[in-house]
Each structure stands twice: as structure tokens, then as C-alpha cells.
Amino acid sequence: MSKPQPPVQKNQTIEVTFEDLTHEGNGVGKVDGYPLFVPYALPGETGQVKVIKVKKNFGFGKLLDVEEESQERVEPPCNVYVQCGGCQLQHMSYSLQLDMKQKQVKDAMHKIGHLSDVPVHPVIGMDDPWRYRNKIQIPVGEKDDGGLKAGFYRKRSHEIIDMDTCIIQDEHNDRMVEAVRRIAEQYGIEAYKEEHHSGVLRHIMVRTGQHTGDIMVVLVTKTKKLPHQDAIVNEIRETFPNVKSIVHNVNSKKTNVILGEQTNVIWGDKYIVDQIGDIKFNISPKSFYQVNPTQTKRLYDQALEYADLKGHETVVDAYCGIGTISLFLAQKAKRVLGVEVVAPAVDDAKKNAKLNDIENAEFYVGEAESLLPWWQAQGLQPDVIVVDPPRKGCDESLLKAMIEMKPEKIVYVSCNPSTLARDLRILEDGGFETQEVQPVDMFPQTGHIECVSQIVLKEEAGSQ
Ligand code: SAH
């Protein structure tokens, strides 16, 4: 029997009615049962679609026009939304974004984790889902008239889009980028040209402590020297009296990595300070720090509620970064042990503990999957284990170690519902039970979603 041919052909224009959304926010419509994925189309809409790509079981299309608009469609407030690759969901209402993300987590629980009964709560969204990002890293290029432009790359390219504002960025970041661009232009500083690996200014990075108002600006150059350094410093300070730290970073390599190895503080402090809840953090140019502190606070509060600490517990925070969650936990636990594979992050974590006079948190450099079994062999018995792994999820040997350590509770913080669901299944099979999952929207207007989940040891597993 010959295989059925897809019912559409490349470059054909066809009317499609959309029923669903993918996790990336693309509309899904079916043509004789064959799914077409179409960016910017919304469920409930009918529109003309040009077929772009035809695969055996699905295809991609481009939305030409919408005949029946969904009530959830909104005018994207950013005027470079379609060109820029940064946001994916600005064309839909915020409530649809939140519903879509909740469904994505539910689907992962059901299809990947076979955990259809686990409650997935409505997503905790932001009251105002704009201007939330505390960090910007923006490439600098040359305009046709020879001036400088700072903007993000066009989708799937390294062409810089000239933009004057990014509306998911803290306003200070936007204004600082614009000021540095103008000052650099005024002093005739050349933009870096990627194709020839020549020129000077590559990126402008700005970090704002949203709680403290501190600002750090980093100018990344290909050259060892920043031309007109003193004049530039003075101009920045005059324009932004609340700037706390001005940094020059040298990146001479042909690379997509933004910051190079050499970092010189050319004016002010090495760090800026920010605060989440009662905890202060030192942030240096290279520190990992959550980009949306408002929602981070909500995420950590939920993690703390799930940990349900009474004060006598020993807690392990695997994947601890600069100790953000560990220090939150330390306020309520007897002892916290943080593990992190990046050594400078562990140094930051130790400094952050000192900054907050926290003495019951210890930090170790290592792989969580190696350190936990070793600790177990030494007789350490944690009551609660918190994990917050990167997108690929927990290493299998870490899951195995947790199953053997039998903590009363595991709190799993995750930026990827698929690997979360996969790992929850392994923990369930190892004697744990997932109680609930709370998604938190850390990245409004984009397709990302963060979750926190409470997992408890089943009684029979604990008494074995
Ligand atoms: N909990 C922190 C950081 C989470 S990001 C916060 O909320 O700020 C995940 C962290 O895991 C990163 O800092 C990364 O360097 C670290 N990491 C990645 N693989 C690891 C491993 N195998 N063992 C320990 N840490 C790891």
C-alpha cells in the first residue's frame, strides 16, 4: 500500500481554521487531518495560509491574513515584534498566554510523566507583564549613515535591528543602552563588524537591581583599550547619577559568547546589590542572577511553602547557582548544603551568605550527581532536597541517589516541563509521590515557563 501523500503542496495558498497552539505559540490547523503549524495564528481563527514547508506528517505555513479574528488577539505593542526573535507571544492576550502555559505543563505531565492526576495549578502571572527584565545584553552595529545602532538580531540571522526600546526590559536598561550608544557615537567609536572580525564596540550590557535601583553598565570591546575611556565614564556618570559600576570587558575572540575573559572595573564598585525578599545579592558582570526578580520571589515563596520547614531540617540545594534558593531556605532550616558545578558561582554564594549574616549555609563545588552519593556514604541524611536543574533536567544518577537517600520531601524547580515530567515519573517509580505542580510565569511574552513541584516520600517507601 502506498503511503498517503500530504494533502497540501509547497507554495499553495489555502484557507485554514485553527484549533490549537503549540508550546512555541504557533497556531495549529488541520487540513484533512494533516497538521499545519502557523506562527501568529490563534485558536478559533480562520485565515489564508501560504504553505512553506511540507513534511510527511506535518507542515509549516505563513499567515497571509485573518478572516475571523480571535477575541484573544491583541495588537503587539512592540514595533519590531515580528522581525525580532526575542518574544513569541505578544500577539495574544496575557490571559491566553497563561492558559497556554498551564496546558503545556498539563500535557507534559500527562503524556511524558503519565501523571494525569497530579494537580497543575493556574500559572502565577504578573500584574503588569512588561518591563520585567533586569538584564540586557545588546549587540552594537553600524547604521547606513555611519552612526551606531544597538538592537537585537533579526530572527535566524545576525543582522542587527535598529530599535530604540525593548518593552520587556526595565526602563533603566533601555535608557542606559541609548545613552551609551549616543556617547560612543559622539566619540567616534567604531562598532564591531562580525563578518571581518574588526572594529571596537561589540555589546552593551546593563544590569539593574530593581529593588535597590543600582545600575551596572558593561562595554564589551574587541580591542584591549576602550578609546576615550575617561570621557565616556564621565558622560555616563553625568547622564545617570545612580550608576554604581562601569565596567570594560575585552572579548577579542571570534565567538557568539558575549563576555570575554578580561573584566576591568573602570569606575565604581565591582558589584551591584539587589534584594529578593529579605536576602541581598551581590551581582557582578558574569554572575547568574534570575532576570525577573518579582516572579522569582513568588517562585521561591512557593518552593519554601512546599519545603514546609520547621527549623530542625537538613536541606540539600542541588544546582544552587549563587545560592539564591539556599539562602531563602537557610532562614527556615537548621542546615543547608548547596552544590554547584561552576566554581565562581560558589564563591558568590559564599559571599552572599556573609552579606546576609547567614551562617547555616555551606556551599560546595561539584556535580550534584557525584556529591550526593558521596554525602550519603558519609552518613548525611537530608530531610528535604531542592533541585533546580538546567533545561536538560536532573542527571539520572542524581535521581537514583535521591531515591536511595529517601528525603521526606523533594522540591523540584524546573524551567522545562518535559524534563520535569520525565524526572517526576522516575521519582514516582522510586517510591515518591508528586503532590502538585505550580507554574510561575517568569518570562511573559515569550514561550518559556517555570514550575515548582512538591514531591513526598510514600510512607511504605520510607519504612522499608
Ligand atoms: N538555583 C539557582 C540556579 C539555577 S540554574 C537560582 O535559582 O538562581 C542551574 C544551575 O545548575 C546553574 O548554576 C548551573 O551551573 C548548575 N549546574 C548544571 N549542571 C550541574 C551539575 N551537574 N551539578 C551541579 N550544578 C549544576
Image: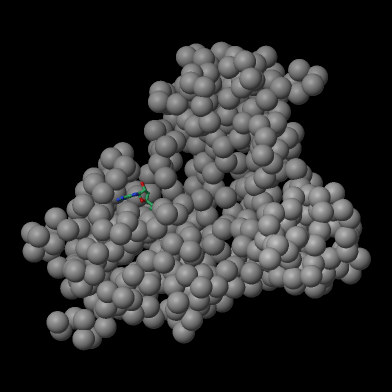
Q: In the displayed orientation, state which residue is furthest to the left.
A: 378
Quadrant in which residue 96 is drawn: bottom right
Q: Return the x and y of residue 401 as percentages of the image width and height.
A: 22, 63
In the displayed structure, 386 sits above or below 430; it is above
Which residue is pictured at 71% across the width and 70% down the height? 20
Which residue is pictured at 69% across the width and 18% down the height? 186
Q: Return the x and y of residue 232 as percentages of the image width and height.
A: 58, 21
In the displayed structure, 338 sits above or below 422; it is above
Name the foreground residue: 82 vs 126: 82
In the displayed structure, 63 sits above or below 455; it is above
Quadrant in which residue 238 is drawn: top right
Which residue is pictured at 39% across the width and 58% down the height? 393
Name the foreground residue: 47 vs 458: 47
Q: In the displayed orientation, state which residue is furthest to the right.
A: 67
Q: Return the x and y of residue 217 as percentages of the image width and height.
A: 53, 33
In the displayed structure, 224 sits above or below 112; it is above
Name the foreground residue: 313 vs 194: 194
In the rendered image, the quadrant that contains the N terminus is bottom right
248 on left or right of 327? right
431 on left or right of 413? left
Would residue 218 be seen by someone viewing this image from the given angle?
Answer: no
Which residue is pictured at 52% across the width and 55% down the height? 292
235 on left or right of 454? right
Q: Return the x and y of residue 39 as percentages of the image width and height.
A: 74, 56
Q: In the displayed orientation, state which residue is furthest to the front.
A: 1
In the rendered image, the quadrant that contains the C terminus is bottom left
How many labels, in total? 0
Would residue 68 be seen by someone viewing this image from the given angle?
Answer: yes
